[in-house]
Image (spheres, grey):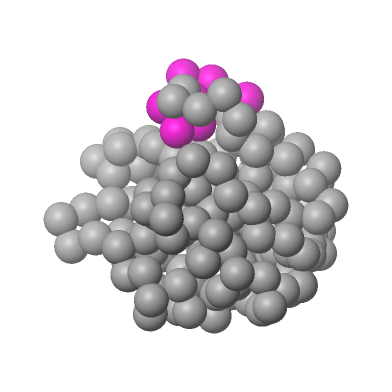
């Protein structure tokens, strides 16, 4: 489940051109809401309806990404302000408490756009330097997408606009 951030797509394109192994194919730039999510074969109309109810009352969220940050294994952008986005994530997590974000692997599951996954330590600073001049970017989060991973890669199963269908 993701919130697309199309304004960050050019950053992923720039990183993929020089560091192709660090950018995942198949999904555009996004804030991950909950991964893993319900397995594709269990993703029925009731699950999609539950997702829709979460975003039905939301107005689009204006966000800004001003800094590229790095930690071991990840280069990312954090939304500013983080509060509304984090509340949305927490509402989803509360709805599916048996599915911890990232399988419970990370203590910090705060909202972020992944720019590079698993970069070599030697490349980390260079990737940050590549991205920083492209910032800041502004976006309007207005849609929740339910994505599934299948044999053919990622596919969007449902697009749920904020504020109703």
In the image, is residue 39 above or below residue 7? above
Rendering quarter of residue 42: top left
Which residue of the protein is positioned furthest toward the top in this rendering? 98
Residue 105 shows up from this direction? yes
Q: Is residue 16 left or right of residue 91?
A: left
In the picture as drawn, the residue positioned furthest to the left comes out as 151
Q: Residue furthest front?
A: 122
Q: Which residues are magenta?
A: 94-103
**Image height check: is 18 above or below 158?**
below
Point 81% across, 55% down: residue: 80
Q: Quadrant of residue 23?
A: bottom left
Residue under the point 72% across and 74% down: 135
Residue at position x 67%, y 32% from top?
90
User: Is residue 144 something that shows in the picture?
Assistant: no
Instruction: Name the quarter where the C terminus is drawn.
Output: bottom right
* Left or right side of 50 for 20: left
- Residue 64: percent from left, percent from top: 78, 65
81, 128: nearer the viewer? 128
- In the displayed structure, does residue 41 sit left or right of residue 118? left
Residue 155 highlighted magenta (yes or no): no
| Place of residue 150 in the rendered image (x, y in percent of width and height, measured from the top left) | 21, 53
Which residue lies at the image location 82% right of the left edge and 43% below the top edge? 83
Q: How many marks?
A: 0
Residue 87 at x, y percent in the picture: 75, 38
């Amino acid at each position: 489940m993701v919130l697309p951030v199309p304004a960050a797509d050019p950053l992923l394109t720039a990183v993929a051109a020089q560091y192709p192994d660090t950018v995942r194919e198949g999904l555009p730039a996004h804030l991950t809401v909950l991964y893993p999510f319900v397995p594709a074969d269990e993703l029925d109309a009731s699950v999609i309806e539950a997702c829709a109810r979460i975003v039905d009352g939301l107005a689009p969220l204006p966000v800004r990404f001003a800094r590229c940050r790095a930690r071991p294994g990840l280069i990312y952008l954090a939304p500013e302000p983080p509060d509304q986005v984090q509340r949305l994530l927490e509402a989803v997590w509360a709805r599916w408490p048996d599915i911890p974000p990232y399988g419970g692997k990370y203590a910090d599951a705060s909202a972020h756009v992944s720019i590079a996954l698993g970069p070599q330590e030697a490349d980390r600073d260079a990737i940050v330097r590549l991205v920083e001049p492209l910032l800041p970017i502004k976006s309007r989060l207005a849609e929740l997408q339910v994505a599934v991973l299948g044999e053919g890669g990622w596919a969007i199963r449902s697009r749920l606009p904020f504020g109703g269908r």
